[in-house]
Amino acid sequence: MSDAAQAGSTLSGNSLLYLDGVTVSFDGFKALNELSLVLEPGEMRAVIGPNGAGKTTMMDVITGRTRPDTGRVVFGDNVDLTRLDEPAIARLGIGRKFQRPTVFEPLSVHDNLLLSLAGDRNPRFALWAKETPAERVRLDELLATIRLVDDRDRPAADLSHGQKQWLEIGMLLAQEPHLLLVDEPVAGMSDAETEETADLLREINKTRSVVVVEHDMAFVRALGVKVTVLHEGAVLAEGSIDAIQNDPRVIEVYLGR
Amino acid sequence: MFRDKLTTITLGCILGGALLLAALNLLTPGASAAHVPGFVISLVGKYLCYAILALAIDLVWGYAGILTLGHGAFFALGGYCMGMYLMREIGARGVYANPILPDFMVFIGWKELPWYWQGFNHFWFALPMTMLVPALLAFGFGWFAFRSRVSGVYLSIITQALTYALMLAFFRNDMGFGGNNGMTDFKDIVGIPLNSEATSAGLMLISAVVLAAAFLLARAMTRSRFGKVLIAVRDAESRTRFLGYRPESYKLVVWVLSAMIAGIGGALYVPQVGIINPSEFAPGNSIEAVIWVAVGGRGTLAGAILGAVLVNLGKTWLTSALPEVWLFAIGGLFILVTLLLPRGIIGLFAARSTTAGAEAEPGAAAAKSAAREIAG
Ligand SMILES: Nc1ncnc2c1ncn2[C@@H]1O[C@H](COP(=O)(O)OP(=O)(O)OP(=O)(O)O)[C@@H](O)[C@H]1O
Ligand SMILES: [Mg+2]
């Protein structure tokens, strides 16, 4: 479980992720406008902002789904993510949880996690792969972490919305990423589930870097980390949750609505 | 033998049924009530070949979500490779008594055998070709299509275009495949005369064994980790990319394998029906084959086999009883199945748990909406 910490030390620069003047436009409309942002190794960052601020687009750029018009995204010392495609970026150790949970519905909870486990992704390997004892141990751990031990053989389709969110977090953990990007993890969760999710993310952050996008201010407060406010594709403010909540510009565009 | 009943039943029906029919054909006197006439044997042999094609289609459509409307092309190519062997096996017994050139080449005035006909006088060469040629075409096609992320309706349309283009090409005499007459009047296969009841029964049995083997192969593949990735790709392709998978390479593997299975199906088909011509490439054939799979139950393997046999039984009966009705019947059947039986006939019986690949109904809908989100 300590890979991320290791990764942090091997990445000798002083940032894990560095977005440098990233612009993305859709038909002339700038979803991201010269966005710059630095994430330290081991850091957890909360990103908030009104609908359409560009939060999901930022994750699309980091994970290779959207290519920016200008700007660089540097991971670790010198890997420019804008030159890589999604699988290559995923294999570098960047995991992503989508805004709406996307698990593989007909597959069992166990199989969803199995396919997500870090390892060889080639078809030739997958054709002959047998579940190893090490994998079994890891899967048991993950199932316990995401509280789905009793549901391991159920198709993911049968899970509740909250359980799917958790399964997806489990799939993310299974990848052993250095950096997790989590888009609105508590949307549609009960208060109790929201609290547990905050605990889980803090637990995860002990070994990995995390970027969380969320609208739920109580949840962001519970995370207790540095907050970045996006607005119209650029950083509007950055700082502690208290500083952010008292920032008149933030109140005007986001919190005051 | 297998933990799930469906597999055991399927294998039992294929192998047991074929053996029983062959025995009743060969071992009972012609006058006996239990005697199975020769035409039934060749019909069953034909159905088994169709079932092999259906299985190939289910592998890519049911498990990888590639709705192919051109699989008849791979079937026909396998058939042509076998046809070329059977043509050369005729040797000097043709109308023009040319020991090297098939009759149709003599007829159009060719003096020597084109390079691509070399080697087809050997069975050991022709047999692997019946799989290799479809595999090569599938590889080339799939490599471009899957890399450029062509999918859905667009891919279906290109597969139709592919088989249509091949049909037009094979219609041409100067291609050297017999033009619109194709190849026929075969005499024997590996020295065994084709026009005997024992040969028919033998070919039918071989078809059954090949079908059973292809079924087991497909089953093993779809249950492996590879198969689980395929299902993931089918339902949420772009999600798999963010896990580090390259869906295009998974699709390519299953696509090429499926083309090979279809090819061997075609190769078994040709000696049993005694002819191969460009109409085997007709786009309608490929569409019909997809309907077999839909009727039997997509993504269940056994359903594809069942669908191929049942629909063709119906076709045989209907085309002799009411020939003009057939097209409407199959069209109507397709609409009915799509509306009322989205999981086909097998879906009526099989519980969800028996086939890992079978789509869970609520799941399918949710997966689609999720996929839509990822796809933007
Ligand atoms: N593929 C696309 N094509 C055109 N416009 C897009 C595309 N993706 C995003 N946009 C636009 O870019 C802007 C930023 O969208 P984005 O999804 O990043 O916002 P967000 O901050 O995640 O919002 P939310 O809180 O609603 O999730 C929006 O106005 C959106 O309509
Ligand atoms: Mg968003």
Image (tube, coloured by chain):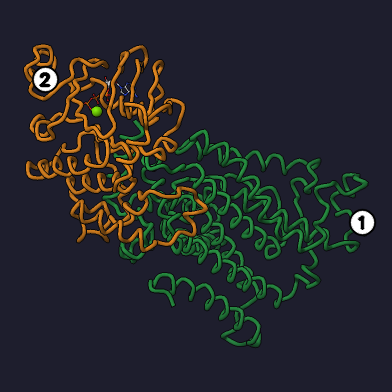
Chain colours: A orange, B green
Q: Are marks 2 and 1 in contact (CB under 8 Å)?
A: no
Dot 2: within a 10 Å radius of its alpha carbon, few (fewer than 14), some, or many (20 or more) residues? many
| Mark closer to the observer (2, 1) | 2
> Callout 1, which amino acid?
Tyr
Kindly identify which numbered label has been placed on residue B96: 1
Q: Chain of mark 2?
A: A
- Please state which of residues B278 and A167 is positioned toward the viewer in this rendering: A167
The answer to whether any part of residue B109 appears in the image is yes
* In this view, A76 is above or below B124: above
The answer to whether any part of residue B58 appears in the image is no
Residue A185 x %, y %: 20, 38
- Please state which of residues B327 and A79 is positioned toward the viewer in this rendering: A79
In percent of the image, x 77 and y 55: which residue is there? B84
In percent of the image, x 29 and y 32: which residue is there? A41
* In this picture, residue B261 sits left or right of residue A257: right
In percent of the image, x 22 and y 39: which residue is there? A205
